[in-house]
Image: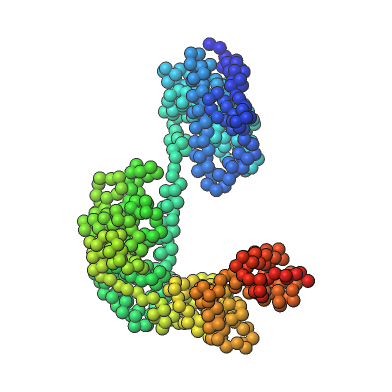
Amino acid sequence: MKKPQKMAQAAADDLRAKVHFCSETGQIWLHENRMLLVHAEAQASLRKELIDTLGIERAKGLLMRMGYASGMRDAELSLNRFNHADDMEAFMTGPQLHALEGIVRVTPIKVELDRAAGRFYGEFLWENSWEGQWHRRQFGIHTEPVCWTQIGYACGYTSAFMGRPILYKETQCVGIGDPNCRIIGKPLNEWDDAQEHVKYFSRESIADQINDLQFQVAQLRSSIGERGTLPNDMIGCSAAFRAAYDLLAKAARSNITVLIQGETGAGKEMFARHLHLSGARAREPFIAVNCAAIPHELIESELFGVEKGAFTGASVSRPGRFERAHGGTLFLDEIGELPLSGQAKLLRVLQEGEVERLGDQKTRKVNVRLVAATNTGLQRLVKDGRFRADLYYRLNAYQIAIPPLRERKDDIPPLAKSFLEKYAAIHGKKLGGFTDKAKRALIDYAWPGNVRELENMVERGVILAPNGGRIEVNHLFASCDPGMPIEYGLDRKGDLDPSNAWNTTRAFCNAVLDGVLTLDQVESMLLEAAVTRAKGNLSQAARYLGLTRPQFAYRLKRLNEESELDRSESNPTSAQGFNDA
Ligand SMILES: [Zn+2]
């Protein structure tokens, strides 16, 4: 038998002839495989970013699998090319390809192989290891060998070549400070610690892990909510609120399925959580799902769980929210968004007390109290055929309607006060409450976003108000909020009656919303006012509006062009003719 080194040399000459650069088509070919000539530095940056963003373990697995895939391709080439040659000669193609591709110089130290008998032992010296050198440059000396793509390549190549799993390990590596790398490869079952290495070759689903983490975050958030905000949020002395609250308190004593109706932000989840915590299930899980937030094609697997292999991407079995809520309460918000097939499954769970995971024949008993919520009239959805009537009647047995905030204005001051205390504590602020103008603004506002909007707005106020001071109107309302006083509505000197300014601003906004004024006209008016005040100096006018000179000029020009299209020459509000003084 010839020496492996000499064979390697002969193989190398022949291989170079198999590389074709086809500049006309923008392709590089190695025999039948398309190749890429990439910059080592760019590749190294990608490798570094993988490590930085995914962490060492995940990046290592990803790179090993990438190497494995190219090793397998090259093994295909060796086997085709040396169809009739002896095994050793064919095998040596791999080390030569690795060198030809610019990865590493491979010198065989000891190679014994017998494909028919499945015997393999290989020991190689690696010099100029691309990966080891770059890793050392970017991260310094590591505690373990680092040539992951390369070791993956060796495993992939030899496994495909031998037709059985062969595992390589680096016994020396430049990445840990050795002068060169050395690798040893033998069949998987001849390694004692094979499992530790093989795990990197199986693909893990990052999506599944993210999903799980999101779920945990949501649970943690809601448990923080339970401790910190529940007593504060269930505040209300208005008759409308008390009526809803009494219904809730009565339902808490039983296990009845409850349907909560209310506008967005009215506090449906808070009501559901309160129901859960005041009943016998308080110590069991409370699981909240917003049906509108999950894509239709995923909602059933989210709710009912999925068995491994049920569909592409279901790489692990996962319990659904029903199973996770076992013993406790499942809150389904925006139930009207649940697709019809999901509704049928939900009805079955309610009737039988059993769930069936997607792709699974087995049924599992679940003991879950269901609380559903909706902000739309479910009855109309039933009429339109988008919601099952039988499910509707089942859910509708006990209905609680939460009044919108604008219908319980008495509750605004105590709610605002409790949110102020909560967020002052969170943000470490000492505040003396709200100014009178701010209190009045809070009561006058229509609150389309209900309690949630109030809470967000008070938090914004807490952040913007100076420490030791009080929350003012402009700390609460962004200037673009419709109906709220914007700059010229609020006179800091106090000359202007605030309610007057309020009405003026509101009327102005209504004019825009009603289509009496167009946005372009508003913009045009502002630009002209700025130019007038700046006495025609466009740079100064731009500064008044917080724009650069070119931005200002661009807007003027655009409005001008549009006004020429639809306005007569005589219109004096045209911005034409302004010059930089
Ligand atoms: Zn190495």
Q: Is residue 523 left or right of residue 511?
A: right
Q: Position of residue 580 (x, y in %)?
A: 76, 69
Question: Is there any visible trace of residue 60 in the rendered image?
Answer: yes
Residue lying at the far left of the rendered structure? 352
Compare residues 409 and 108 and report the one nearer the observer: 409
Q: Position of residue 263 (x, y in %)?
A: 38, 71
Q: Is residue 235 left or right of residue 529?
A: left
Residue lying at the far top of the rendered structure? 1
> Total label count?
0
> Residue drawn at (55%, 32%), measured in percent from left and top?
150
Q: Position of residue 475 (x, y in %)?
A: 56, 76
Quarter where residue 348 is shown: bottom left
Compare residues 188 and 301 and report the one nearer the observer: 301
Q: Position of residue 145 (x, y in %)?
A: 56, 36
> Residue drawn at (34%, 80%), measured in percent from left and top?
240
> Residue drawn at (37%, 51%), measured in percent from left and top?
297
Compared to residue 269, the image places residue 201 above or below, namely above
> Residue drawn at (43%, 24%), measured in percent from left and top?
163
